Amino acid sequence: MNEGVNNRNEILFAAVVCCISVYVIFTVINFPKEAKTFPFLVSCFTLGLSIIEGTMAYMRMKRRSKESTQDQASAKRAPSTTLIVTAFALIIYPLSVWLIGFYFATAIFLPVAMRLLGVERPLHILAATVFLLGLMLVIFTVILHLQLPLGVLWGGN
């Protein structure tokens, strides 16, 4: 029962943050060009994250209402193993960005990290990875006109 209340509170919080983000986006539109880039990007990013959080809380609420009580302790990895693998991944990620480029390294790192953090549904992992890579592409390449590292293998620095 308490988890259901927490999920409803998370959904409500995400809805409030969405409304505030939309308000700030429409307010920032009237700012001068040099002053609106950062608040606009932060508001768009916050809007996207709040939509993701609200959707995930809703899906958790639906899933828990359908599932019977199970012993999930045996299915989870030991915290020490997860910590070691995460630390190793955080060392390998910058090296892989240098070697194969930001987009390929991130496309590998995000699903692995989400799986280690307990996301079990492949469709959720795929959707989050595609959304975040697309969001980063739009923000850095289209809006900010920045080129992210291509990697040594693809002719980058």
Image: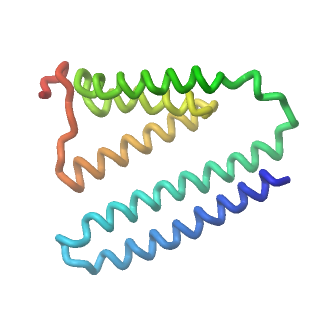
Residue displayed at 31% across by 33% down? 103
Residue displayed at 72% across by 23% down? 75
Residue displayed at 87% across by 36% down? 69
As drawn, is 137 to the left or to the right of 150?
Answer: right
Seen from the viewer's position, the closer of residues 51 and 95 is: 95
As drawn, is 22 to the left or to the right of 141?
Answer: right
As drawn, is 39 to the left or to the right of 77?
Answer: left
* Depicted 127 relative to depicted 139: above or below: above
Name the outermost residue toward the front. Answer: 80
Give coordinates of residue 26: x percent, y percent.
38, 76
Residue 40 occupies quadrant: bottom left
Give coordinates of residue 49: x percent, y percent.
49, 54
Give coordinates of residue 35: x percent, y percent.
22, 72
Q: State the colouring used for the structure image.
A: rainbow
Count of numbered labels shown in the rendering = 0
Give coordinates of residue 19: x percent, y percent.
52, 72
Residue displayed at 45% across by 69% down? 21
Quarter occupied by the C terminus: top left
* Depicted 75 relative to depicted 3: above or below: above
